[in-house]
């Protein structure tokens, strides 16, 4: 068996950001207003600080303004909700990103629900999940949306295929399964209580790993010729898939880093510009 082809996310992400930049420039020219993304960070977790900085840098490249709100780790749910409601009501802010996880002190769901659906460019609210699942206009959760774009980039049509999603979080596992279902895949969700994970993965034409456990999915469980999407990111640039063994069995596989990550940020940028266009009536 030959080695899998790499599903590079950096080149398509660059193109998506470039297109968003053109759209943002056109919008600024027509309306006199540049799209603006508010980033909200609670505490100073080093990984979260890095993620927010990457998103701000990408905003700058695309001509999208970013307004950063840094809140102390001791912020209460009520204080965070109040800040998000304030941003939701602020006409100069078009998109809101609450960097998560927000920590144990805060009710994350209550915070997400304080984001106005029309500014939910990270696709985290109940409203966004519902519109996405029903295939109605709205914002998709960014990592799942980026994964579907990556499949399209590499000519992978999910229709009729068996897709196994490992992980069922509200922002990643569940929504990516819903997007695959909407594209006519037969979807199985696995999670920490799944009895025989290996057996489930062995059935998959498309595997999406979204767990946060280094190298949990091993090459021996990958069906020869399967498409492997590794959304996991663990310390040391390690994914949830054992890349070295999986690359020998898969037909296509995402690298970590450089696969799903850049597509996530590109989707955020694209949705922020779209949100601004709608709010500015352009
Ligand atoms: P999460 O909220 O912690 O969810 C992890 C999921 O994995 C849960 O559904 C959990 O099951 C399941 N799980 C845990 N151990 C398992 C096991 N041994 N076997 C099968 N399933 C198991 O994590 P998340 O926020 O979805 O993130 C998952 C990974 O994606 C992390 O590595 C994160 O860093 C990465 N991520 C990457 C991006 C990106 O842009 N590339 C974006 C977001 C997240 P239960 O539900 O039963 O607990």
Image (cartoon, rainbow, N blue to C red):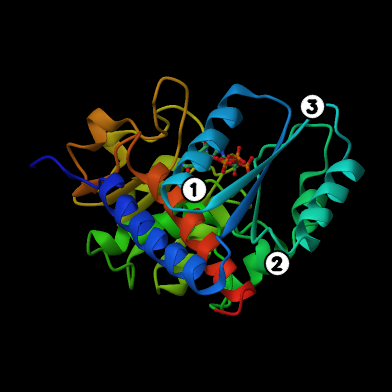
- Residue 194, compared with residue 181, is above or below; it is above
In the rendered structure, the answer to whether residue 36 lies left or right of residue 103 reads left
Q: Residue at x 41, y 20 (%)?
A: 236
Q: Between residues 23 and 206, which one lies in front from this camera angle?
A: 23
- Examine the rendering and report whether any part of residue 158 can be seen: yes
Instruction: Point out the tag, 3 or 2, that comes first from the N-terminus.
Output: 3
**Would you say residue 122 is visible in this rendering?**
no
In the visual, does 106 lie left or right of 199?
A: right
Secondary structure of the residue carrying tag 1 is: helix
Q: Which residue is mark 2?
A: 117
Residue 166 point in image, percent of width and height? 48, 46
The tag earlier along the polypeptide, 1 or 3, is 1
Residue carrying label 3: 73
Q: In this figure, which residue is indicated by the disc labeled 1?
A: 59
Residue 139 occupies quadrant: bottom right
Q: Nearer the viewer, residue 269 or 202?
A: 269
């Amino acid at each position: 068996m030959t080695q899998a082809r790499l599903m590079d996310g950096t080149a398509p992400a660059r193109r998506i950001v470039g297109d968003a930049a053109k759209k943002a420039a056109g919008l600024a020219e027509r309306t006199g207003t540049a799209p603006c993304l508010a980033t909200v960070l609670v505490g100073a977790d080093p990984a979260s600080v890095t993620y927010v900085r990457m998103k701000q840098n990408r905003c700058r490249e695309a001509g999208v303004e970013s307004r950063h709100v840094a809140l102390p780790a001791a912020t209460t749910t009520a204080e965070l909700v109040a800040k998000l409601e304030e941003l939701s009501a602020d006409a100069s802010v078009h998109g809101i990103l609450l960097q998560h996880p927000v920590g144990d002190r805060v009710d994350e769901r209550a915070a997400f629900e304080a984001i106005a659906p029309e500014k939910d460019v990270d696709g985290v609210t109940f409203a966004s999940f519902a519109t996405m699942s029903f295939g109605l206009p709205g914002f998709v959760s960014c990592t799942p949306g980026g994964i579907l774009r990556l499949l399209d980039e590499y000519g992978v049509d999910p229709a009729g295929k068996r897709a196994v999603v490992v992980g069922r979080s509200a922002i990643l596992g569940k929504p990516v399964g819903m997007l695959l279902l909407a594209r006519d895949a037969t979807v199985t969700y696995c999670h920490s209580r799944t009895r025989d994970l290996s057996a489930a993965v062995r059935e998959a034409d498309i595997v999406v790993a979204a767990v946060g456990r280094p190298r949990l999915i091993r090459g021996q469980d990958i069906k020869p010729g399967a498409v492997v999407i590794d959304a996991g990111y663990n310390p040391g640039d390690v994914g949830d898939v054992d890349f070295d063994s999986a690359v020998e069995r898969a037909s296509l596989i995402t690298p970590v880093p450089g696969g799903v990550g850049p597509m996530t940020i590109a989707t955020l940028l694209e949705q922020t510009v779209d949100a601004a266009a709608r709010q500015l009536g352009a």
